[in-house]
Amino acid sequence: MSEITGSASYELTENGLIKRPDVVLIGGGIMSATLGIMLKKLKPELTIQIVELLSSVAMESSHAWNNAGTGHAALCELNYTPVKENGEVDISKAIEINEEFEMSKQFWAHLVEDGVIEDPAEFIRKVPHMSFVKGAENVEFLKKRHEVMTKHHFFDEMQFSEDHSQIAEWAPLLEMGRDGKDQIAVTRVETGTDIDFGSLTRVLFNHLINLDGVELATDTAVRDLDKEKSGEWEVKVKKVGDFFSEKIYAPFVFIGAGGGSLKLLQKSGVKEGEGFGGFPISGQFLVCKNQGLVEQHRAKVYGKAAVGAPPMSVPHLDTRVIQGKNSLLFGPYAGFSPKFLKRGSMLDLLASVTLDNIGPMLSAGMKNMNLTEYLYQEVINTHADRVDLLRNFFPDAKDDEWDLVTAGQRVQIIKKDKEKGGTLQFGTEVVAAADGSLSALLGASPGASTAVAIILEVLEKCFPEEMTEGSWAESLNAIVPTYGKDLSSNQELYESVRSKIDEALKIGAAKR
């Protein structure tokens, strides 16, 4: 497994990079920020070099306009509660995601108490989470889902209503212009959240780079990764505008570069990265220009995904608070671009195809023709078509009160499968070298909301001894109090810890 010893002093390259850091973090997003702070808390003497391609951190997937900003707690996302063949609603995935989100909140609350985060209102606010459906069959599903979910203590505060007047009180726009004969239903959890992950990421990096032994290099690309006989990684980096590359060496490398992770994982040559492919999907949102409507709606309202749509394309009418300003968004509308990053290259998809992943990619493509049809329809839709989709949620929507903005790129994982050849995966995959010297993150949603659980998995795979013995194990109890405990089966512990962290984050304790 990876061994990082910590360095008392270090030497810099001409461009100000640490020549031999203990850790290299590739990517300036929420994942690298979370891992960096966690490592410095577990072992303060570590030296860490952060490498970011763009001119600042949090400019790609972690940027507030490039993600939905939902604190994914499975309170409103219907794709986390599928119906099984026997007709029962399966809430196991919802329970898993809710617990992982609570772990993120525990970590953030710890950082508030530790003074790292001065004002949690900079990034997190209480905004109700709602699910919305139309039609008798969907209403029956939502009712059944509510019955099942409220039996579990994670979701026992969830409310259900088919009453138009009640729905109008909770979310006025859902009823504006609606025929009272429409059969609709909603569920509502008052203690949902809206999160500005861009602001959070910047706060975390501002703290991290002011710690001893941490350097940040922006406008710097990682060109190659090679494993040395000594066990260290040679990381070839190139400053934007420079002709020559530089080399730095580290025993542990983390690739948290969003859509750029797949290509870097392929460059590393680790066996565990073989067979992975990626399929990029771009996103767009309608943004409301009528501030009066913005102020009337305060909820994150999620519906059901269209047939063939990826889970990240579940439609939602969203209150967003970005850098303190209220906004109202609807979407996402999926699109296709061969870029793996919003500021990436049109050759990204083609360049990612290799001999070991072309089979899985072709196989997954053949099995997901409905996704291709869905993306084609999304691409050819006009502005009027998009507003028509919005009217399912907000019947009184007017074309000229909404503008279209392009959000971030997401790269869905294509994974080699012995039986199926290749499968299109959703969620985030942690890939780690067998010796623990390198780890990469692939995939997307729920991503940022479950960053702490994902990073803990990275640490477990790459530093198993430290995570189970000695000071690391003890320190984790302070950083994430319920790490290693099962909140899903311990209601008393869940309620006790949650009340404390919600108070620390200034989002109010749950009503019970």
Image (cartoon, grey):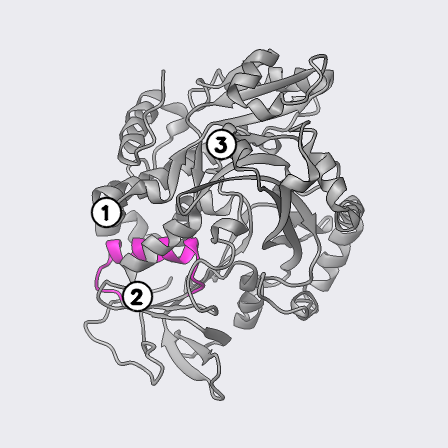
Q: Quadrant of the N terminus?
A: bottom left
Given contact means CB atoms under 8 Å apart, are the residues at marks 3 and 2 in contact? no
37 falls in the magenta region: yes
The quarter of the picture where residue 427 lies is top right
What residue lies at 67% left-to-right and 45% top-to-bottom? Answer: 333
Up the image or down, 507 lies above or below 256; here it is: above
Q: Residues within 10 Å of mark 2 (few under 14, many from 20)?
A: some
The quarter of the picture where residue 498 lies is top left
Question: As shown in the figure, which amino acid type bears the numbered disc 3?
Answer: Glu
Up the image or down, 127 lies above or below 386; here it is: above
Question: As shown in the figure, which amino acid type bears the numbered disc 1?
Answer: Ser
Asked if residue 276 lies left or right of residue 449, the reply is right
Question: As shown in the figure, which amino acid type bears the numbered disc 2?
Answer: Ile
* Helix, strand or loop at mark 1: helix
- Provide the major secondary structure of the magenta segment: helix
Residue extending furthest toward the bottom: 243
Any part of residue 458 in sight:
yes
Residue labelled with disc 1: 475
Q: Residues within 10 Å of mark 1 (few under 14, many from 20)?
A: some
What residue lies at 38% left-to-right and 39% top-to-bottom? Answer: 124
Residue labelled with disc 3: 295
Q: Position of residue 443 (x, y in %)?
A: 57, 52
Q: CA distance from mark 1 to mark 2?
A: 17 Å
Residue labelled with disc 2: 4
3 or 2: tag closer to the N-terminus: 2
Residues rendered magenta in the picture: 26-46
Asked if residue 460 lies left or right of residue 363, the reply is left
Q: Residues within 10 Å of mark 3 (few under 14, many from 20)?
A: few
Q: Position of residue 156 (x, y in %)?
A: 45, 18
Q: CA distance from mark 3 to mark 1?
A: 43 Å
